Amino acid sequence: MIRIGALISGSGSNLAAVIRACEEGQIDGQVVFAGADNAAAAGLDHARNAGIHTFIVDYKEIIAAYRQSPEKIELPRDYDPHDVASKVAFLADNTPYERIKEFLLTRAVAEARMLADMAAYPFDLLILAGFMRNLTPYFIDRVNIDKDRPRIMNIHPALLPSFPGVDGYGDTFQYGCKVGGCTVHFIDYGEDSGPIIGQRSFDILPDDTIETVKKKGLSLEWELYPACIQLFAENRLQVVRRAYKRQGGGTFERMVVEILPSA
């Protein structure tokens, strides 16, 4: 039985699906905590109703405090700004320095608080279930202790690598795609760029709306996420580095997930 931690920002429908899958034996595991980045995250009730420990780290409060008195910010002792800045891969090259500084410093404070709350509840896998904050290398490196065995999993509302970001279904629909879907992947230092574990797709019909597209996608998310978590529980996910040929010559490497056969 694996121990699962969860981070959410909103309704927590995927968290509810994972809790239900654990209770019904579809996942060989149990959720041991659920954290949120704001007190209004309604999904925390799913955890509380199941007797699962919850905590809140208010990102907006931390950012507001920094903007009011930046000199008073208390960074974690193990925070190395040069290391984090050199690894983070989701900030645009033209982002102003002060914006980057504020982002990384306030994230360090928030993530250190999350790590402290999580420390009381040992876990094997951390799932992001609608957590709308990018995690920085500071946090990722302290969860992914074994570099060959990542253990932060996310579900994204699009068929990655297309349409990363916060509105996958909306971007898919507005682009005019005929197929939509969802993706479960491991987290890396980029934005929705980590190695893909599984995907599900659905047709987008002429009479579909953004509401029906989201409804189709969510129904698949609630199936796909538990299935991928169970693969992790069975120790069947192996991340490997694979070389590919570029068009026009040369090669590049990418981390990919191989699904091992069941025992």
Image (spheres, rainbow, N blue to C red):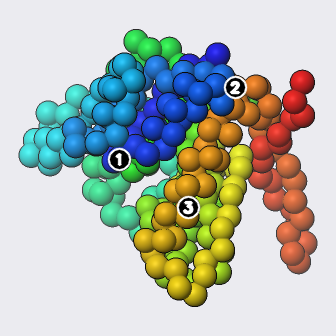
Q: Secondary structure at mark 1?
A: loop
- Residue 159 location (% of width, % of height): 64, 64
Q: The residue under label 3 is which amino acid type?
A: Gly
Horizontal side of 14 relative to 41 (left or right) equals right
- Residue 23 location (% of width, % of height): 55, 25
Q: Residue furthest left?
A: 68
In depth, the one of 151 and 67 nearer the eye is 151
Question: Where's the C terminus, which quadrant?
Answer: top right
Q: Secondary structure at mark 2?
A: helix
Residue plotted at (52% across, 56% down):
218
Task: Note whether 30 is above or below 41 in the view shown.
Answer: above
Residue plotted at (68% across, 64% down):
201
- Residue 156 location (% of width, % of height): 55, 55
Q: The residue under label 2 is which amino acid type?
A: Ala
Q: Secondary structure at mark 3?
A: helix
Task: Note whether 112 is above or below 92 in the view shown.
Answer: above
Q: Which residue is disc 1 drawn over? A: 11
Q: Which residue is disc 3 drawn over? A: 217
Residue plotted at (61% across, 43% down):
225
Q: Which comes before the other along the chain, label 2 or label 1?
A: 1
Q: Residue furthest front?
A: 24
Mark closer to the observer (3, 2): 3
Task: Note whether 161 is above or below 24 in the view shown.
Answer: below
Distance from disc 2 to disc 1, alpha carbons, whole Å, reads 25 Å
The mark found on residue 233 in the picture is 2
Q: Which comes before the other along the chain, label 3 or label 2?
A: 3
In depth, the one of 192 and 128 nearer the eye is 128
